[in-house]
Image: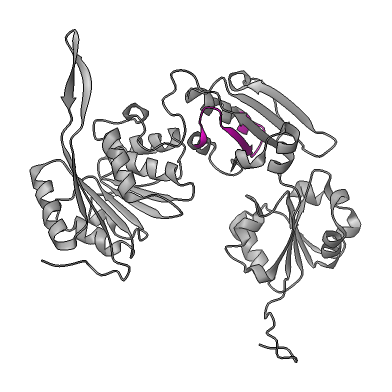
Amino acid sequence: MSSADGKPTDRTAPWLTIVGSGEEGVAGLSPRALAAIAEAETLLGARRVLDGLPGANLAGKIVLDWSEGFEATLAAILARRGMPFVILATGDPMHFGIGSTLARHITPAEMEIIGAPSAFSLAATRLGWPLQDVSCISLHGRPVARLAAHLADGQRILALTSHGQTVHEAAAILARAGYGASRLTVLEHLGGPKERIVDLEAREAGGQLFADFNTLAITCIADASVLIDGPMSGLPDDAFEHDGQLTKREIRAAVLAHLRPGGSRLLWDIGAGCGSIAVEWLRAAPLAQAIAIEPVERRLAMIRANAETLGVPHLAVVEGRAPSGLAGLARPDAVFIGGGISAEGTFETAWAALRGNGRLVASAVTLESEARLLDLHARFGGNLVRMAVSRAEPVGRFMGWKPLMPVTLWSVTKPADGSGGRQP
């Protein structure tokens, strides 16, 4: 579509305005934000924010809150597409805010964003923390267990919270992980008349009450015995609950190097055992996704426990044996076959599902499974690596090398066009 002067025009004009506000409420809104509210036919916001608006701003308008849940409220927003609609948010709507979520459903041309300083920015100014050096995360409406993936000695973290109890849940996670000496700063009602800042150690949080509207600042301090210090690849074997079915640390680091985690890519961890590969895949890339497929029931609980403890509770766990257990799963960008490569159809099913340019890595410890990898390498190319690891252990009064079982790794990239590689 073109205008009278021949220049292209937008077919979609902004009808949705998302207004960020601070603790001071309507008093801190810009003239443009106030004008958008005045022109809106529908207002949507948290009840706390809506209650702060003068009656004159609400007269004659449809007023909605989030009490019906996100899906129902999203349907209500989309049903009014094209009509003046204002969402009253808090802080920066595009930083862990509703604007970020709605951008997955509504085009940028349909929205106008009027932001306000985020809770992260306000907290950083109070604490004197350079924001670029801080890990900014959201525990608001998300499992607090995700905090565990960000712990490292000396790391500064700013976290959005759901309510006052989030502080206690975070403190408990810090203590269990060996970071009980970490310094917490609870910043309540930032920017408003009820602003309060409380400093304490994580181990001191029990019994204290905090306002529901707060931002949590953490300076991580690790105990001397802490097992996990930062988002490293190749976590200690003792970091995982397992029954022996564990890809050992040295091999696990090599597998992850071949898989190349990153972005929002989805991994299938087939024959997951205790889930160590899937867990580390998720820890390596905050937006990554993973599905752990495991047929042994008792190990499913281990996978879930490891995911919770190590900060990736969003790991999807599927009970099933490949290849039948792979049916109906979302197409992966990477596949690790840690168990079952010799089972008929496992490789073929995984390879067919794998997206173009995706990586597949398989391991073998038995002669039969190694022979299978040699055959697949001859047919599809890729790289073969044989790893033999020995660990120093006591032998009486002395030390000696105790070898682990050698492991053969095969890694291959699927062609971009999705074809099946060379044939013999």
| x and y, in percent, of residue 63 in the image | 77, 59
In the picture provided, is 225 more to the left or to the right than 107? left
Q: Position of residue 271 (x, y in %)?
A: 25, 45
The front one of 23 and 183 is 183
Image position of 208 (left or right of 389): right
Question: Which span is picked out in magenta?
Answer: 150-167
Placement of 263 over or under 304, stated as above or below: below
Quadrant location of the N terminus in the rendered image = bottom right
Residue pushed farthest right? 56
Q: Is residue 332 left or right of residue 404?
A: right
**Residue at (77, 38) in percent of width and height:** 190
Residue 189, x across and y down, in percent: 77, 37
**Rendered image quadrant of residue 105:** bottom right
Q: Is residue 18 left or right of residue 414?
A: right
Instruction: Count numbered badges in the picture.
Output: 0
Q: Viewer-proximal residue, 174 or 67?
A: 174
Against 330, is 249 above or below?
above
Q: Is-magenta flag for residue 159?
A: yes
